[in-house]
Amino acid sequence: MTDEGRAFGTANEGGADPLLVDATPGSEPQTHALPDGSNPPIGVMESDLAIHWDIKSGIITANPIEG
């Protein structure tokens, strides 16, 4: 969750591929498919960038959330 009240996480059902769930105050929650082979983001920036951390390399990347 951000200081502005935006919350994010992942959800899946019955072994389906996980979805990014993005809930912004004042709007309906949205879901977005994760790119193949990616881990769920560790955070989401205000400009709709998903923040990913590769535990093996230690590299942090920011990728646009596509709807």
Image (tube, rainbow, N blue to C red):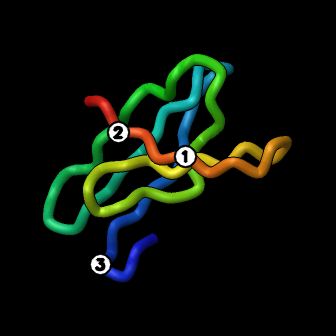
Give yes or no for contact between labels 3 and 1 (Cβ–Cβ under 8 Å). Answer: no
- Residue at the spot of label 3: 4
> What secondary structure is marked by label 3?
loop
Which mark, residue 64?
2
Q: Residue type at mark 2?
A: Pro
Q: Residue furthest right?
A: 56
The answer for how far apart the CA atoms under marks 3 and 1 are is: 22 Å
* Relative horizontal placement of residue 43, taking residue 42 as reference (left or right): left
Quarter occupied by residue 16:
top right
Residue in the image at 59% along x and 55% along y: 42
The answer for how far apart the CA atoms under marks 3 and 2 are is: 19 Å
Residue in the image at 57% along x and 30% along y: 18
- Residue at the spot of label 1: 61
Q: Residue type at mark 1?
A: Thr
Residue in the image at 20% along x and 51% along y: 28
* Relative horizontal placement of residue 41, taking residue 1 as reference (left or right): right
Residue 39 drawn at (x, y percent): 65, 36
Give yes or no for contact between labels 3 and 2 (Cβ–Cβ under 8 Å). Answer: no
Asked if residue 47 is positioned above or below residue 38 in the image, the reply reads: below
Residue 58 drawn at (x, y percent): 77, 51
The residue closer to the viewer here, 31 or 4, is 4
Residue 46 drawn at (x, y percent): 29, 63
Image quadrant where one finds the C terminus = top left
Residue 5 drawn at (x, y percent): 33, 75
